[in-house]
Amino acid sequence: MKQIIHIALKDIKIEFSEKSTLIFFLLLPIVFTTIIGLGLKNSYGNDEPEDPRLVIVVVNQDDGRYGEQLLEFMEQSDTSRPVLRSKDEAKTLMQNESISSFLEIPTNFSQKILEGKKVQIEFTKYAESTTAVGLEQDLLSSIGKLNTVISIRAQGLETINKQPDFPKINQEGFLLEMEKITIDRLKNPPTKAISTQSELVQNQIPTGFEQSSPGQLVTWVLTTLLGGSEAFVYERNKGTLRRLLITPNRKAIIFSGKILGRLLMGIVQMILLIGFGAMVLNVYWGKDYLALAIMLFCFGLAGTALGIMLASFARTVRQASGLTILFSMVLAALGGAWWPLEITPKAYQTAVQILPSTWAMRGFNDVIIRGQNVQGIILEASVLLGFALLFFVVGIWRLKFE
């Protein structure tokens, strides 16, 4: 085992003896991850804006507290958010079809409530708009809360009237305190329904850094892993491998050491890029680190094996270099590293299932976007191990040390 580690560390040291290696190993991946992530931000409608809720335009002509309280209840909604506009602005937006509805809180709305009068608020909408229907239902919920506050005030007023000796000076304070308690209870109800999305849902489309972070990781790590073909062909043509064969080390040890060295380089590069994505770009790389580690290892093994297979076909370093660039770029592009596969036709998504990069991106998206655990990435990891086995078998069968 010591000999395998020694060979692996020797190959890593040689690889990083040139400072230019760091440019392709870390600098360019970081630059491309950042630039492409910014370019893809909100490209496919999945990145959330600052406030993703639907806008409901409100014309508030009331200057009392109940108009403000209704707006406060509306602001607490998880579905919609109020945006104040003048009546002329609201009508213009409706005419231009920029909005499908707007709410008008009338003048003296609060005063009429305090006088015990019935008051109406007007909700103008396009009848055929499904968005307006949803906003109306959300609005009714907020109005229901306000009606509860008003009802509690009315009950408090009835209680006061039944007690002639109740100090008049304290009546309004008593009613305001009842309103305050009611509002606090409505803001923090004892039970609340929360809507969540099942981990089994597979239709989320990654955008921005959620796409560029794993995508550029796959692209550049493939370049590193497949680059093992260049190193192998170079040593074979220079006679280094032939000299290694006359040492006491068996061929299997030499071969294992070179595989380990390339795999370690890829894993270190992946860890650095994940760290950059998580700490600098705020990419959420999943909740199950074991699942992520398994994906990294399986992808690294498949890429290293592919590099060995390419080395068995290349006769010169130039050929190996060309194959490395060709396969790393083509596999990354076709496999969903440069754009989400979810936006491509179904036939295309089916066709690229034969590529290891497709399964790598699918597994990383399961971890990042869908929060999958080990059980959720077993299929992707198994397929990548299958690719690794296939590439190793072909590579070892064809590979020549001399």
Image (spheres, rainbow, N blue to C red):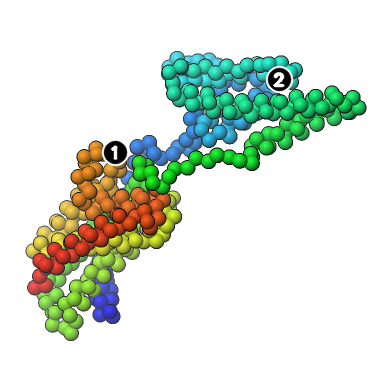
Residue 125 position within the rendered picture, expressed as x and y whole percent measured from the top left: 49, 18
Q: Residues within 10 Å of mark 1 (few under 14, many from 20)?
A: few
- Residue drawn at x 35%, y 41% is 203
Choose between 320 and 372: the one closer to the eye. Answer: 372
Residue 282 can be seen, yes or no: yes
Outermost residue toward the right in this view:
165
| Label 2 secondary element | helix
Left or right: residue 38 compared with residue 131: left
Left or right: residue 35 compared with residue 69: left
| Label 1 secondary element | helix
Choose between 190 and 27: the one closer to the eye. Answer: 190
- Which amino acid, mark 2? Ile
Q: Residues within 10 Å of mark 2 (few under 14, many from 20)?
A: some
Residue 123 position within the rendered picture, expressed as x and y whole percent measured from the top left: 55, 18
Q: CA distance from mark 2 to mark 1?
A: 53 Å
- Residue 149 occupies which quadrant of the picture? top right
Residue 28 can be seen, yes or no: no
Residue 376 position within the rendered picture, expressed as x and y whole percent measured from the top left: 36, 53
Name above or below for residue 212 compared with residue 303: above
Which residue was labeled with disc 1?
343
Task: Please give the label number shown on residue 113.
Answer: 2
- Pointer 2 or 1: first along the chain: 2
- Which amino acid, mark 1? Ile
Residue 257 position within the rendered picture, expressed as x and y whole percent measured from the top left: 23, 73
- Residue drawn at x 67%, y 21% is 63
- Residue drawn at x 21%, y 40% is 347
Left or right: residue 47 compared with residue 257: right
- Residue drawn at x 11%, y 77% is 242
Circles 2 and 1: CB atoms closer than 8 Å: no
